[in-house]
Image: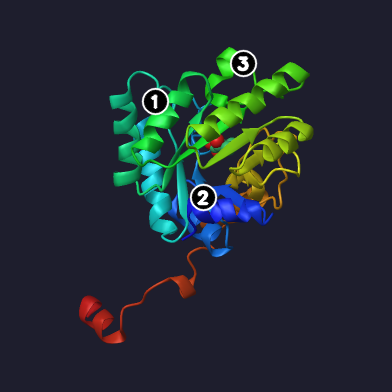
Amino acid sequence: MKTTANFMKMKKEQEKITMLTAYDAPAAKLVEDVGTDMILVGDSLGMVVLGYDSTIPVTLDDMLLHTKAARRGAKNTFIVADMPFLTYHSSIEETFKSAGKLMQEGGANAVKLEGAGDVINTIAKLTAAGVPVMGHLGLTPQSVGVLGGYRVQGKDADAAKALVADAKAIEKAGAFAIVVECVPEQVGAMLSEACEIPIIGIGAGVNTDGQVLVYHDVIGYGSVHVPKFVKSYAQISPMIEKALKTYVDEVKAKNFPSQEHSFSMSEDALQALYG
Ligand code: KIV
Ligand code: NA
């Protein structure tokens, strides 16, 4: 399994870091099998698999369940689990408890926290306690209500400078990497240049130290709205739909199950049964 030290080395050697989300065992296994460097059990699972329209309703128990499942599927990949909405703001005791659960019960190797401000101090306390932390800047979906929607962040000079200051503060607080979401490519490049720790981009251009995408978006599975920064490498929803429809049609037409999918009694047993 790769470690935070490996990710630092990859940045130094300019080897791109790959990250994908996974929320269950079979997805995590596939993500691991293709050699992805890191798995994110993102709170995007709220939208992608739980059917919510934001990440706000996601609970710690939701994250725990899915982190455990991902870990069972990918035993040898570094797993980052998102700390969900308001589970790292009220008190440090609560924060430690939440992070502890995700790591000790869930099997995560690290946790991800959104934002800067007060969160920077929290990151410092977590890392001091031995919890590897990944930051998350730019578009921070847990703050969608405050940001006023899902839109590109850091578009003007002041906002870009503020992002660099936040990233450096998060690095100083001890984070091992930072996800930067939905910023101009120039800002993605600037942040990667400014920080020693890896910047993992999503909608942040090609010049970040790594990339992360949502599993379902990459394979074209069930996603309703796909943002501009997503590339779907397959469209599996129509394939699933076709398989399901064919099954339903075959049952109605009594074409399934056929002999091939059925069990039979022996002649002797039939004889004994009917005489
Ligand atoms: O929850 C998630 O999937 C994320 C990524 C988009 C970075 O936080
Ligand atoms: Na997230």
Q: Position of residue 171 (x, y in %)?
A: 54, 35
Q: Is residue 62 visible?
A: no
Q: Position of residue 200 (x, y in %)?
A: 62, 42
Q: Residue beneath label 3, please?
A: 147
Marks 3/1 in contact by CB < 8 Å: the verdict is no
Image position of 26 (left or right of 222):
left
Q: Position of residue 55 (x, y in %)?
A: 50, 27
What colouring method underlies this structural image? rainbow
Label 3, ligand 2: CB separation under 8 Å: no
In front of the other: label 2 or label 1? Answer: 1
Residue at horizontal 77 percent and vertical 35 percent from the top: 185
Label placed on residue 39: 2
Question: Marks 3 and 1, Cα distance to the nearest angstrom?
Answer: 19 Å
Q: SS for tag 3?
A: helix
Q: Is residue 186 visible?
A: yes
Marks 2/3 in contact by CB < 8 Å: the verdict is no
Q: Residue beneath label 1, please?
A: 88
Q: Is residue 192 above or below residue 68?
A: above
Image position of 272 (left or right of 233):
left
Residue at horizontal 57 percent and vertical 62 percent from the top: 35
Label 2, ligand 1: CB separation under 8 Å: no
Question: Marks 2 and 3, Cα distance to the nearest angstrom?
Answer: 27 Å
Which quadrant holds the C terminus? Answer: bottom left
Label located before the other in sequence (2 or 3) = 2
Label placed on residue 249: none
Label located before the other in sequence (2 or 1) = 2
Q: Position of residue 221 (x, y in %)?
A: 61, 46
Question: Marks 2 and 1, Cα distance to the nearest angstrom?
Answer: 21 Å
